[in-house]
Amino acid sequence: MQKAATAVGVVFLAVGVRGFIPGITTDYDLLSFGGHHPMAKLLGIFQVSVLHNIVHLLFGVAAPALARTVQGARAYLIGGGIIYLVLWIYGLVIDETSSANFVPLNTADDWLHLVRGTTARVANVRPPLDGAYGGKWATFTW
């Protein structure tokens, strides 16, 4: 669980940093702080802004602090999963051209958020490798 949380954090840090690199982020000159107008896209697919990149960096920075314990790693994975499921639903219900799309999100972001949110559930139902919880299955009921 702790290694999974750390790995997720590394991915978030990499994504956050890459969101600021021209070439990896297409239309980099159009990168703005936030709002529904940014046309910059990470890998030419995922709409990003400075705010969006900062959120990824913050999720990445939180990982090592929380992954120090099994409980912290679990909270990081589950809490992050819940946040990303909420972002998925939010992205589905808002109009991408409205001012409510302040992060900003596009369809590719929405489906990536679904994948990120559901992986927290998958990671949470496997038996812990470190023998925590008496070797019993680690489960979490939503």
Image: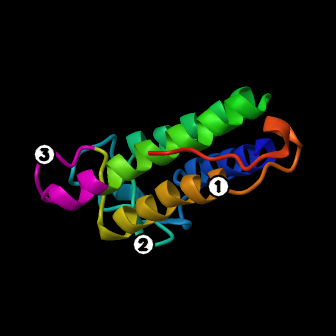
Q: SS at mark 3?
A: loop
Q: Categorize mark 1 by other alpha carbons within 10 Å: few (<14), some (14-19), many (20+).
A: few
Gap in angstroms between the C-alphas marked 1 and 3: 38 Å
Q: Nearer the viewer, residue 98 or 3?
A: 3
- Residue 62 placement, left or right of 104: right
**CA neighbours of label 3 inside 10 A, class few (<14), some (14 to 19), many (20+):** some
Q: CA distance from mark 2 to mark 3?
A: 21 Å
The quarter of the rendered structure image containing the C terminus is top left
Task: Tell me: residue 28, above or below residue 60.
Answer: below
Disc 3 residue type? Ser
Q: Position of residue 107 (x, y in %)?
A: 30, 69
Label 2 or label 3, whichever comes before in sequence order: 2
Which residue carries the number 1 mark?
Answer: 125
Residue range corresponding to the magenta coloring: 89-102
Q: Magenta residues: mostly which secondary structure?
A: loop
Residue occupied by mark 2 = 45
Where disc 2 sits, the SS reads loop
Left or right of residue 81: residue 10: right
- Front-lying residue, 71 or 89: 71
- The reply to whether residue 43 is in sight is yes
Residue occupying the point 65% across, 55% down: 125
Q: Is 131 inside the magenta-drawn segment?
A: no
| In this picture, residue 57 sits left or right of residue 74 | left
Report the mark closest to the observer, 2 or 1: 1
Which comes sooner in the sequence, label 1 or label 3?
Answer: 3
Q: Earlier in the sequence, mark 2 or mark 1?
A: 2
Question: What residue is pinned by disc 3?
Answer: 99
Three-letter amino acid code at disc 1? Val
